[in-house]
Amino acid sequence: MTDRRRFLARTGAAGLALFSLSGCTKLSQKPWVGSLLGEVEKLTRRAQHLFAGSHALAPEFREADIAPEFRANGTLDPGTDEYSAHAAMGFKNWRVTVSGLVERPLSLALDDLKGLPSRTQITRHDCVEGWSCIGKWKGVPLASILAAARVKPEARYVVFRCADNMSPAGAEPQFYYESLDLLEATHPQTLLAYELNNAPLPVKHGAPVRLRAERQLGYKMAKYIKHIEVVAELTPIAGGRGGYWEDQGYSWYGGI
Amino acid sequence: MPFWQRVLGLRPPGPVTVIARHAVMTRVAHWLNAALLLVLLMSGLQIFNAHPALYLGEGSNFAHPVLAMTAEPGPDGSLKGTTWVGRNRFETTGMLGASDVDGFPTARGFPAWATLPGPQWLAMGRLWHFAAAWLFVLNGFLFAVWAAGRGHLRADLLPTRDDLKALPQTFLEHLRLRFPKGNAARRYNGLQKLAYMFVIFGLGPLALLTGLTMSPTMDAAMPQLLWLFGGRQTARTLHFLCAFSFVGFFLIHIAMVVLSGAWNNLRSMITGRYVIEDHHD
């Protein structure tokens, strides 16, 4: 066969595979298809940044818009002995550390966080599954904490390490983690939130501290935050794709 | 010509004229669009299956979906699928709510044969959907610019006053499965023009905008979108309706293609050549 014929035959075969239904599922299982489709994520991210820039604010709503019951998803209770002990004591000994590419590493108790200037916002939470809930969040803008820790010039991402173990019992523990670029991390509505609807954050919503990144989907907003690490690269961490769900194939860019 | 011959669209016995029906641009854009819409529909149903319920407004009022597909064990222990449209309940086991995946009864909105990928796989469904969406928008945009620039829009797609006046007549003739012949077949009729205009400049852009309204970053960039559609969840419901309007258009489109001469129509969208009978009118 000539190259041209072979090319046509392969294109034809790929076309047929695409339109036979099982073919689509099989194609999806090939790593190159996933990475090719994943390239689109970069295009989407650039295009959305073009529109939203660094400062466009997520819409905020009225008290009357707050959902009567805010749905929780993902981990509903980390359930480890350590976490349960913290919960029993009202998280008074819970600390959030800030480390990595910063000039001044921090270790903040929950009361330290509550003592810092806060922001309260009524925003819509969008789950990757498709549903939305409106809630009122209070917390410390992450930008002010990063400013206090003095981020080094080579820093590019902020990684959140959490207390919820995602592995089944008996398996190697794998704690939830997530990451944002500095642009999203320092957005004025990005908070380390400790209150939902005027009450301390419930366990199912990430007590005592969770992330709010209002221009992103829910899975980007890590719950049960213990460590914040400022880094230049995401590849050395866990599966290397920047988050627990990202390592399972979800897009790192969660703006759509 | 007998009915079956007309349906097949074979070359009629009498004298004919062969015309160049569709430009290359139209043909390429048409088939790309067909493939992309199929991927968008099936990956869209995969995404829908992650939370098979629709709502109105900004947030999800979980107690009052406008549409929901649920599954629960029936009295005999087998999984029963139920579809709720508002408060109306429909038993839809095997199709909606619960259907077999590789032989196992599974709780899922749409069945595996209708989704891309087949099994529940939201992350992959999203990758397919967004990749196809970019190409769909690019293809539609290029076609629209070309059609406007080359006069195709004005000359062939915009209904004329006469087209509009003849609409009731055209409609009745379509119902009787009598389609334009001879010189009248050289041009799109009023119904065709309206249908194509509605899909290209109505449904397409509406699907794009309601899709973008579901993106939290786009809502920050353009909060007008939320105002325009009445909230993110309403936009999601409209997006779903857009998808099924495309399906509705597709079914009517295929019926018309087949009934007005399957082969002649199909060939004209592949090679561009279209046969017209000379002896009519």
Image: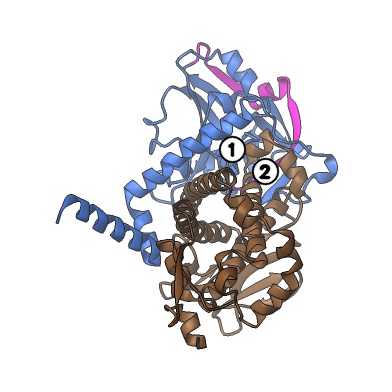
Chain colours: A blue, B brown
Task: Say whether marks 1 and 2 touch (CB < 8 Å).
Answer: yes
Query: Label 2: which residue?
Result: A125
Q: Position of residue A230 (x, y in %)?
A: 49, 22
Disc 1 on helix, strand or loop? loop
Amino acid tagged 2: His
Query: Label 1: which residue?
Result: A221
Q: Is residue A107 magenta?
A: yes
Residue B217 appears in the figure: yes
Q: Quadrant of residue B250?
A: bottom right
Looking at the rendered image, the quarter that the N terminus of chain A falls into is bottom left
Q: Which residues are magenta?
A: A102-127
Q: Nearer the viewer, residue A202 or A135?
A: A135
Kindly report which numbered mark, 1 or 2, lies closer to the viewer in this rendering.
2
Q: Earlier in the sequence, mark 1 or mark 2?
A: 2
Q: Is residue B143 magenta?
A: no
Disc 2 on helix, strand or loop? strand
Q: Residue at 65% of width from left, 27% of height from top?
A: A110
Q: Residue at 54% of width from left, 23% of height from top?
A: A182
Tell me: A204 left or right of A37. Answer: right
Amino acid tagged 1: Met
Q: Position of residue B248 (x, y in %)?
A: 61, 68
Q: Position of residue A43 (x, y in %)?
A: 48, 36
Q: Quadrant of residue A215?
A: top right
